[in-house]
Amino acid sequence: MPAPRFLSDKLFPERAKRARRKEARPGELLEAALDLFVAKGFAATRAEEVAARAGVSKGTLFLYFPSKEELFKAVVIENLAGRFTEWNAEFEAFEGSTSDMLRYCMRIWWERVGSTKASGLTKLMLSEGSNFPELAQFYREEVVRPGHALLRRIIQRGIDSGEFGPVDVDHAIYAVIAPMNFLMLWKHSAMVCVDADAHIDPETYLAIQAETVLHGLSKPQEAAA
Amino acid sequence: MPAPRFLSDKLFPERAKRARRKEARPGELLEAALDLFVAKGFAATRAEEVAARAGVSKGTLFLYFPSKEELFKAVVIENLAGRFTEWNAEFEAFEGSTSDMLRYCMRIWWERVGSTKASGLTKLMLSEGSNFPELAQFYREEVVRPGHALLRRIIQRGIDSGEFGPVDVDHAIYAVIAPMNFLMLWKHSAMVCVDADAHIDPETYLAIQAETVLHGLSKPQEAAA
Amino acid sequence: MPAPRFLSDKLFPERAKRARRKEARPGELLEAALDLFVAKGFAATRAEEVAARAGVSKGTLFLYFPSKEELFKAVVIENLAGRFTEWNAEFEAFEGSTSDMLRYCMRIWWERVGSTKASGLTKLMLSEGSNFPELAQFYREEVVRPGHALLRRIIQRGIDSGEFGPVDVDHAIYAVIAPMNFLMLWKHSAMVCVDADAHIDPETYLAIQAETVLHGLSKPQEAAA
Amino acid sequence: MPAPRFLSDKLFPERAKRARRKEARPGELLEAALDLFVAKGFAATRAEEVAARAGVSKGTLFLYFPSKEELFKAVVIENLAGRFTEWNAEFEAFEGSTSDMLRYCMRIWWERVGSTKASGLTKLMLSEGSNFPELAQFYREEVVRPGHALLRRIIQRGIDSGEFGPVDVDHAIYAVIAPMNFLMLWKHSAMVCVDADAHIDPETYLAIQAETVLHGLSKPQEAAA
DNA sequence: AATGAATGAGCTTTCATTCAT
DNA sequence: TATGAATGAAAGCTCATTCAT
């Protein structure tokens, strides 16, 4: 029996199990699925196409994933949900001011998620979530909730340490997430833009937003609306 | 109780009802279609469902619209494309500064489009446009292009009158559209928002964005990025 | 109560009734139906198209003809089946040799049927009869059988009068019908001919065939195979 | 009992059965399709019926043929179009007089096409070609044209060798094809024949027609009309 | 573990027929 | 008598899923 890779695996054995089962599955399938889901959406992606892109037969796909929905969940785990253990650990280990932590958080988010195909999963949930309630539920539970929880802990750390004022934490979370969402949506909205392709520089944009948020969080001020 | 539209309606109330019924049919279908397209997307909306929601049978839908795609186009025309003549006229008639015109433009856009179901059509094109190239093409041609053209004329008016500096018009258009798009996408993202979602006040948000844009357009400055 | 138009109406009152009901129906519908049935076949002809071509609404068509099949039957009666009363009468009244009668029969058939759209009905039954057994049955009963009967009587007259030898009447009937069928099929087979449009002259062809048949029927000879 | 086609079939009889099964599938479907198309026509043949007759489900049919039209084309290729290479080769190898070649041609045509279900395809194109222009086009291109080309070469051979006079080749082709077409149409007209239908003996009929045609083609005469 | 042939529910679209007006 | 809006059964085709090999 292999040892749990993360401390948290002991605390959340079910999540750990899922993570390990995931490992046993061919990464090619997950990668192919990510590509196609992001490019074409959930409903419009055909199982056979995923298999073909991964270089296996249709049957093999269903050998590893009992259904298209489970395949999608696995993709979400692989690219988003399954990383929170690591991200949380990084947060636990972080040394420095909470302001720096928040700046780092937003920058690293762009690097690891926003700028990657993984952000397409969020856009996908936005678009098709209402048609696949179980997926939406899963996504909320496994991505949105841990994401909010992580931010909550960061902000709480700042409040506890006296760096931040006694802000409404929920509003603060929102203030952080809003620009991230904006960037993600922007990145995946090639369709509505026609001629004027003015480019946002995401890193700069996020850095500015980070400062704005931090300004709102700082001791004597109110939370940003 | 609304008055009968025709005198004869009083004399032959039953015929009138039937005539109005026939007249009303396309409208009822378009409304049902708008609701469902916005709620479930194009591909996931079944023709029969639209018909049922409009209170008619499957066959009747195809009596009025030759295909699902044509139904969608009709919905787009009814709710977006077909309104540009009116909007353009309003622009021609506008008296006042171009700054006010732009403020009015953004405010009225939220009132008439952004806050209505119609904005769901834009979100839909974003999600599914790539799967239905003909629809995407139609949408670009009939909605995006006239929309950009309208904004272009507004901005050009400001430049010509000396109110605005010699900005890059395409960038300026983009700066106006960006917050609109963001609001729309936000509005339709209920699925990803979980617990503590502080709500943006769209009117305020847009007003602030308008001022930001106008600041960037003002005489001695560069266009907003 | 109007008097029966033909003597035979008394003998076959049901047929007479059908013939009279036919009269009450708008000829435009029957004509439009004939055109379309011949041009496009039975299955491929849409009821609405027939109505439109006749200048009435779809509902009106079904007011006169309870179904598409009944419409077809009426067309067959109008153009073929219903004429046998008249043709039989003409035969009864014919004065002259049976050879001349047969020559006249074939010539007049081309004039009144073979060269007209009515011959398309026969081709139609050939093509689609097997898909519409009731129509095929009707056609056999109302067109093929009376047609054969008429020929049978002609040939029998020749035998009785001593003009023809004691031929096998069925074979003789066949010998007369074969060239007619050939011409009809030929006329409606534009599709298989590509470049070589060699033309048959139907009148000449039929005249020659008539002589051949008569040669076969003549006193000291055997029937043609 | 036929021998297994491959050695390995003996070693792995089940795999062999399955492999042959997959190999056999298209053939079974094509045969079922031929039967039904000939019996009921193209439009009236339902895809599911074809599948059922071949002992598979609806889905399987579309696994092998992307559409009903393509299925029909495949049937035409299998039974007519695809055989011209063989027939042309036979013609190239033929040793003997061109008259014999033409006699052989007509006889063998009856044996291989006219008397088989394949001839129903020609009748089908006649009936329904105008409703399915793409199929008609395909049939003309892949069946009518090569057929005419083959006959043209035969006749030209006779002219070149001096056996035939300098006839109009197109008319000559037509003179050969006419009796073939007639026989085919006759064969498929069971529906209009009622009681006493003396049967043509196709072999004899064709032999006689062949002599007639050859008479028309012979040196000192004009082409047959 | 891997395959891919086979399935069948589900969707869009057509059209003969009905019926309220 | 005439209309034409409304119906719904039926047909072609797709694709997630199963299962014998």
Image (cartoon, coloured by chain):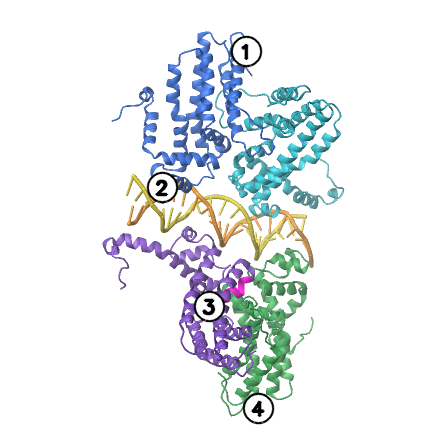
Chain colours: A blue, B cyan, C green, D purple, E yellow, F orange
Identify the magenta region. Answer: D120-129
Chain under label 4? C
The label nearer to you, 4 versus 3, is: 3
Chain under label 1? A
Q: At numbered mark 3, what does the secondary structure look like: helix, strand or loop?
A: helix
Category of crowding for the residue at label 3, using alpha-carbon neighbours closer than 10 angstroms: few (below 14), some (14–19), many (at least 20): many
Check disc 1 and report the residue beneath it: A222
Check disc 3 and report the residue beneath it: D119
Q: Could you tell me the amino acid type at mark 4?
A: Ser
Label 3 in the same subunit as label 1: no
The image position of residue D133, as x and y in percent, is 55, 59
Query: Disc 2, disc 3: CB below 8 Å?
Result: no
Image quadrant containing the C terminus of chain D? bottom right
Category of crowding for the residue at label 1, using alpha-carbon neighbours closer than 10 angstroms: few (below 14), some (14–19), many (at least 20): some
* Nearest to the observer: residue D166 or residue A59: D166
Check disc 4 and report the residue beneath it: C161
Image quadrant containing the N terminus of chain D? bottom left
- Cα–Cα gap, marks 2 and 4: 87 Å
Check disc 2 and report the residue beneath it: A56
Q: Magenta includes D126?
A: yes
- Cα–Cα gap, marks 2 and 1: 55 Å
Q: At numbered mark 1, what does the secondary structure look like: helix, strand or loop?
A: loop
Q: Earlier in the sequence, mark 2 or mark 1?
A: 2
Q: At numbered mark 4, what does the secondary structure look like: helix, strand or loop?
A: helix
Query: Disc 1, disc 4: CB below 8 Å?
Result: no
Chain under label 3? D
Category of crowding for the residue at label 2, using alpha-carbon neighbours closer than 10 angstroms: few (below 14), some (14–19), many (at least 20): some
**Residue B180 vertical placement versus B125 (above, below):** above
* Nearest to the observer: residue D135 or residue B107: D135
**Residue A52 vertical placement versus B116 (above, below):** below
* Residue at the extreme left of the image, as rendered: D11
